[in-house]
Amino acid sequence: MSMPASPSEPPYDNVTSLFGEGWDDAPPPEDGDRWDTPIPLGQARALPPFPVDALPGWLGEAVAAVAEETQTPPDLAGSLALAVLATAAGGRAEVLVRGRWREPLNLYTVVALPPGNRKSAVFAFMAAPLLAVEKVMVEAASAQRAEAETMAKLARSAAEKASSRAASAAPDEKDALTAEAIALAQAAEAATIPEKPQLVIDDITPENAATMLDQQGGRIAALSAEGGLFDIIAGRYSGTPNMDVFLKAHAGDMIRVNRQGRESQYIQSPALTIGLAVQPSVLEDIAKVRGFEGRGLLARFLYALPKSLVGRRNLEPRTIPDQVADTYTTTLSGLTLALSDWTDPAVLTLTPDADRAVLDQQKRTEPKLDKGGSLAHVVTWASKLDGAVVRIAGLLHLAAHPADGYTRPIEATTVQAAARIGDYYTAHALAVFDAMGSDPALGRARTLLAHLQNLGAEAVTKRELFRGLARGDFPTVADLDPALALLEEHGWIRQDPPPARTGRGGRPPSPRFQLHPEISHPNP
């Protein structure tokens, strides 16, 4: 289900560049020698819209409805839908794929949209059921907390009185009273008061994140319509980046924090969920933070770069139907409450067909990670893609079966729906990392384009290009290939068909490329 187009322009045929103006439509197919307008390097053809129809019915209807009422791209609500599901299920369920491969169901998502896109309104609707459940959990725990507080106070009082008696006891009673005092002191020390339940946090430091995870049984979600969390990780308070907690809490790796003069914190299997909506400039800024990419933090996020509808919005949109809002609230609340008491995560399994669907996903991804593959320059992010697809499949499964999803295996169709969402995030991640300068082919393509513009020729062979270029940029002829492919993809060059072989042997002719008229005859 997708949001209706505004009268002026289809809202999802293109996306804005990450840090600039809108991108042109993808050109039509070539017709003979006709050239289409080339696409500037660093920009790409239209990014896909969020596949709302891949979500279970009640969730997809809510995403489409809130996108319509707020006149925001459904990518925002769609990514938040996954984040709220991960808030409900993260740390409470995991998917067993095969062997020792298990995936927890927490996610890190980030949507980049300029100011004025009503991000807060979308967050308010999508997160409201979680906050309502949190309130119910706090009220339900109040009696238990009050009882624990009273018992702890009585234990401390009994220990103090026993200590006083032992201190003033006669010699023949001292040993027995001392033993009693020690036992009561140990009991008082062991008395604990349950923490107030909490599902969602906002602006926290890495230290507080570890504390909250410790207090909440290793499960918490950071949902925010701002990008302040990136500033915190980058060292707003400490002066140096501190990302260990965020790295480990995505993977479920054990966290141990020892601080002088304070009780140690130990979280066996942390599950942090992050759902953010930020301004595009925030992604540009975090790319400059030392350690963010090298240590893999950027690789843990699923990115969405929808096109802003500001200036083209329907000023009289349909409001969210009561039935859609009520179903969303009831279903998400029920799922969250049903999973809230799980201490050991429910283990979701796959049907044989679903396992084959996961294997198909792996087979599609693996060749792309190899040198020269389409994902080779973002291998750190792409290496986590298959795991993300499995996590999304687990969330979609629980959303489709909120009452008993943990008792039935995940179907192949659910994995396939998750793979479609994975394809969406892959396209958007490539745009993000290209804008961050992660693709060395992009820099070489710009160098090559500048060289072609200086040549002033209408055609050139690959061998001629190599002879005229600096060896520092292109050490071998093969190093030209990724840059040439990128220029051809963007419409700047076009390779001639290879000539027929004569059968006389010898070295084959070098590939020949026609140059776009804007290169050979630039406009004055």
Image (cartoon, rainbow, N blue to C red):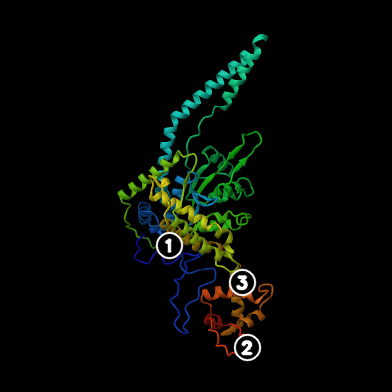
Mark 1 = which residue?
Answer: 49
Task: Judge depth for marks 2 and 1 and give the one in front.
Answer: 2
User: Which residue appears at 40% of the width and 62% of the height?
Assistant: 311
Along the line of sight, which residue is nearer the eye, 189 or 77?
Answer: 189
Q: Residue at x 45, y 59 (%)?
A: 421
Residue at image mark 3:
444
How far apart marks 2 and 1 lie (CA) works out to 51 Å
Q: Secondary structure at mark 1?
A: loop
Q: Amino acid at mark 2?
A: Gly
Disc 1 crowd rating (10 Å Cα; few below 14, some 14-19, many 20+) is many
Badge 3 local density, few (<14 within 10 Å), some, or many (20+)? some
Task: Decide which of 408, 247 is in the foreground and name it.
Answer: 408
Does 377 sit left or right of 407 as displayed?
Answer: right
Element at badge 3?
helix
Task: Measuring from the top left, give residue 511's x and y in whole percent.
Answer: 58, 82
Give the distance between the C-alpha atoms of the residues marked 3 and 1, in whole angstroms. 30 Å
Can residue 523 be seen here? The reply is: no
The amino acid beneath tag 1 is Pro
Residue type at numbered disc 3:
Arg
Q: Which mark is residue 505?
A: 2
Measured as percent of width and height from the top left, residue 469 is found at 66, 78
Q: Nearer the viewer, mark 2 or mark 3?
A: 2
The quarter of the picture where residue 298 lies is: bottom right
Where is the N terminus found, in terms of image quarters?
bottom left
